[in-house]
Amino acid sequence: MSAKILITGATGTIGKSLVKQLQASKVDFIAGTRDVNKAQTTLNLMEDQCVKFDFTDEKSFERALENVDRVFILGPPLTFNLDRILKSFVDYLNQKSINRVVYLSAFGNESLGGDLAFHAIMESYLKERNFKYTILQPSFFSQNFKNYEYENLVERGITFNVAGDGKVGFVDTEDVAKVAVKALTEPGHSGKTYQLTGPELFSYHDAAHLLSDVLNKKIVYPNPSEEEYRGALKAGGAPDFIADYMIPIFGMIKTGKVGYLTDDIEGVIGKKPTDLKTVLERDFGK
Ligand SMILES: NC(=O)c1ccc[n+]([C@@H]2O[C@H](COP(=O)([O-])OP(=O)(O)OC[C@H]3O[C@@H](n4cnc5c(N)ncnc54)[C@H](OP(=O)(O)O)[C@@H]3O)[C@@H](O)[C@H]2O)c1
């Protein structure tokens, strides 16, 4: 039996696309998830294509890595000090000499400090060990509007973030998954770091205009202060840590840290990245 790829975060935004693309290319993989039954149904997978996997449960590592020679590592969202959760898994891979990994990091992460410095810490951790790593640094996902702002957009007519007037090149997660497929299945990507952006820079003012067009209703970007943002999240019942996490993340846009484009997607997949409008039309059904 040929060795296969373990996909962590397989049920998430990038993971789902990656699983679909690997299925279409008939590449052997196994999807790691904390809930095998649910994942089998949502991803439409056979029993032997899913395995119980939890970064916080070392007992799940051995079985998940049976007959695996490559791993896609994607850590869960909204987790401070994510490196503390991921390191034991990376240590385990190192111990088992599974050294081909594709790590999902984030564009601009080097500007984040303290308990948000986890992607920079993990990138160094992989580089300092015996890994044939590929690091993917995607920009803010175009899919965030659907995943994280659906109610704001559809019910309240707003996109509510603390990004000031800054700009960012939203990236289609399907493009990120395409790059991951190449990195996992073709030679020539080891030791590389790819910065993955969409083709255009948008402020949230620009995004609100585009969303108004796609949703066929007025969408406004109120450009809230940090205080207003914090207050609105609290009033909506969100725990305080969400604002603590998101304010510095959006701060990267506000301060221009992610305000530039790259051509790494085209360089790897040979095709221009998908623009925000196309993803919004796909997600909001125009
Ligand atoms: N959103 C953005 O704009 C953006 C931009 C750049 C980078 N990123 C990075 O992308 C990652 C998150 O992406 P996302 O927001 O789209 O989330 P997501 O991938 O949609 O969802 C999280 C995934 O994490 C898995 N998960 C949660 N807890 C886990 C655990 N303890 N062990 C193993 N798997 C676990 C979930 O799997 P199960 O529930 O099936 O176990 C799910 O598949 C983060 O690392 C973030 O830094 C995000």
Image (cartoon, helix red, strand yellow):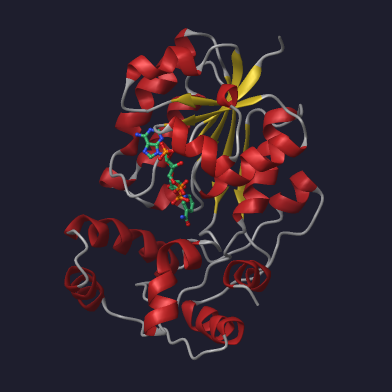
Q: Quadrant of the N terminus?
A: top right
Q: Quadrant of the C terminus?
A: bottom right
Q: What residue appears at the point 41 percent right and 62 percent down from the top-left corner?
A: 252
Residue 104, placed above or below residue 31: below
* Whole-percent x, y for residue 193 in the image: 60, 39
Between 95 and 12, the one lying in front of the other is 12
* Whole-percent x, y for residue 215 in the image: 56, 82
Q: Can residue 241 be seen at all in this image of the molecule?
A: yes
Between 76 and 247, the one lying in front of the other is 76
* Whole-percent x, y for residue 28 in the image: 69, 24
* Whole-percent x, y for residue 151 in the image: 39, 73
Q: Can residue 74 be seen at all in this image of the molecule?
A: no
- Left or right: where 34 falls relative to 128: left
- Judged from this view, the residue extending furthest toward the bottom is 218
Residue 249 image-quadrant placement: bottom left
- Left or right: where 274 falls relative to 92: right
Quadrant holding ligand 1? top left
Residue 94, placed above or below residue 135: above
Residue 24, placed above or below residue 3: below
Q: How many marks?
A: 0
- Left or right: where 138 falls relative to 199: left
Residue 260 image-quadrant placement: bottom right
Q: What residue appears at the point 37 percent right and 28 percent down from the top-left corner?
A: 55
- Judged from this view, the residue extending furthest toward the right is 270
- Left or right: where 246 falls relative to 127: left
